[in-house]
Image: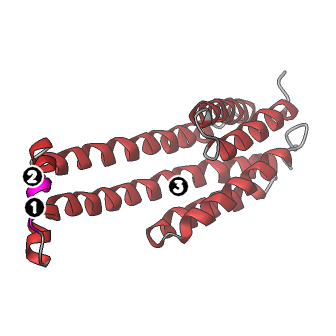
Amino acid sequence: MVELSNVRIFGGIGAILLLIGGFIPYAGPIVSILGLVFLFIAVKTISDLTKDKNIFNNYLMHFIFGILIIVAIFVIMLIAFGAAGGFTWISSLENAEITDFESFWSYFGEIIGGCVLALIVGWILSIIAAIYLTRSYNSIAEHTKVNLFKTTGLVYLIGAITTIILIGFLILLIARIIEIIAYFSLPDKLPTKT
């Protein structure tokens, strides 16, 4: 039978790899993907051990919304680029005479509008993703009695909400560190229900 000690290793290492992956040039995405795989294994194992499918399902929804963020931002920016004129817009910038706000807006309005829309859509989707992560981690905390998972979920949610004012990125970094500590705090076995 799989014990939580294995989950502690997979989850802790996965969370560390996901944290440092963003700071490693070139190999960072590979390190992050490896960390994500380890976290998926840890969450799935906890879900199986506790016989609570919502733990894994909520974590999976968190991941799906994370992918949707990237896709939505890319599609919105692509549409904005097309609305601005695409590659002809880029070549028209060479001869552009931008002397006032009106001429600036006529050249960059669609692109700026697309950026703002992409940021708002990405922000809303990140909040939804954080809600699913919070649900998953709250369930893990209930089953394992490691309340740091509740803290992790809450800090992720606060971070997602406050990314619009940029402080959220620092809060998300703190959440990632708390997540590492939470996984390494897991007991060897599930506590017995009283």
Residue at the front extreme of this rendering:
95
Residue occupied by mark 2: 92
> Residue 95 colored magenta?
yes
Label 3 sits on what residue type?
Ala
Q: Is residue 21 above or below residue 169?
A: above
Q: Which residue range is magenta in the image?
A: 93-97
Q: At which x and y percent is residue 130?
A: 53, 55
Residue occupied by mark 1: 96
For the stretch drawn in magenta, the main secondary structure is helix
Element on which disc 2 rests? helix
Residue at the bottom extreme of this rendering:
100
Residue at the top extreme of this rendering:
1
Q: Residue 130: give its label.
A: 3
The residue under the point 69% across, 31% down is 38
Label 1 sits on what residue type?
Ala
Element on which disc 1 rests? loop
